[in-house]
Each structure stands twice: as C-alpha cells, then as structure tokens.
Image (cartoon, grey):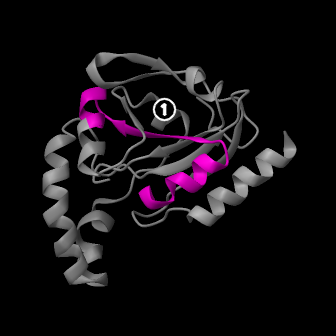
Amino acid sequence: MDALEVGSPVPDLTLSGEGGREIRLSELWRRAPTVLVFLRHFG
Amino acid sequence: MQQNIEALRQRGAEVVAVAQGSGDEAARFCRMLKTDYLCLGDPEKQLYAAFSLPRDSWWNITAQPFLDDPGLAFDRIRHASLKGSVMRHSDPRQLGGVAIVDTEGTLRYLHRSRRTDDLPTTAEILAQLDALGAAQ
C-alpha cells in the first residue's frame, strides 16, 4: 500500500465502534471535515 | 487536546479518535482519557498502516524518557500501566498522528508523530481547518 500524502484520497475503511458497531470513514467525512486523532498505546 | 475540541468544532469539524484494538477497547480507553468525542477501534490496524504512522524504538519509549526527565517518566508509567491494561491489542511502539479529511474524502493535512511527544499544536490544526474552509 502506498503511503498516503496530502491530496490523496483516503481509503474508505471500516472501523469498529462500541458494541461492535461498524462505521465506515465516509460516514464521518461526508457530514463534516474530520480530524482523525490517532492515539498511541498510552494515549 | 480535549480542552480545544470546542474550537475545532466551531470550525465545523468533527473530531474522531482512533485507537488500535476493538471498538469497546477504544471506547473504554477514551472514557479513561475523559474525552467527549467519538472513539473508534482499528482492530486490524489497517488505518494506521494506510497512513504509514511510524513505530518508535523500544529505547525511545522505555529508557530515553528516564534520561530526559525521570520524574515525568515515572509519572507516565503510573498512568500507562492503567491505560495499557485497557488496550490489550495495541502496539506499545506505535506512534500517533493527526489527519484532516475533507468532505470528499481527500487528505488535507497529515502529521505523523516522530516521537511520543511530537503532536501538532491546536493552533496548527485550527489554521489547517481555516485554510480548508477558505478553499471550499
């Protein structure tokens, strides 16, 4: 997989919500610009 | 960052935290961090891989903090043991980052952390959102 750079389309992956609910990224960004904060193991 | 979430929302942005592990683990982790934004799990670490977020060395996450600031390192270990117990499926060496995706699904900003304490300032993220708003 090529590294994403600014200007690239973000892959529409599915993430997991509480209770196992699946959420596609496009569900988020279609509503509003989305700031994704990637957490470390320790926050 | 939590104290600045409202400023980001005022720019019309949604903030979503992503953690390695299940959705339930991510939600518990975020409650521990006292966040009020959506937290999602990336159990297969696909999104971390897609964004090519680097991993740190064992030296940098274990020994180096004690050389830099022993008091702070001990304090972090106290908190980390609790947080680490929640995130059983995440990689301790994984570094974080911040990305902004516009409403078309295009990556508009990406900060890949190079060290554990390397994160963009809220002002930097706000400036990026302002630029994005001006462009749309």
Q: How many marks?
A: 1
**In the rendered structure, does residue B13 fall within the stretch colored magenta?**
yes
Q: In the rendered image, which quarter contains the C terminus of chain B? A: top right
**In the rendered structure, does residue B66 fall within the stretch colored magenta?**
no
Residue beneath the point at 13% across and 56% down: B81
Residue beneath the point at 71% across and 54% down: B128
Q: Is residue B118 left or right of residue B103?
A: left
- Could you say where residue B84 lies in the image, as x and y percent from the top left? 18, 49
Q: Is B49 drawn above or below residue B57 in the view shown? A: above
Q: Is B83 drawn above or below residue B103 in the view shown? A: below
- Could you say where residue A7 lies in the image, as x and y percent from the top left? 76, 39
- Could you say where residue B28 lies in the image, as x and y percent from the top left? 23, 38
Q: Is B62 drawn above or below residue B54 in the view shown? A: below
Residue beneath the point at 24% across and 78% down: B72
Start-end of magenta stretch: B1-27
Given the image, what chain letter belongs to the residue carrying mark 1? Answer: B
- Could you say where residue B73 lies in the image, as x and y percent from the top left? 22, 74
Q: Is B34 drawn above or below residue B1 in the view shown? A: above
Label 1, on which residue?
B47
Looking at the rendered structure, the kind of residue marked 1 is Leu
Residue beneath the point at 35% across and 16% down: A21
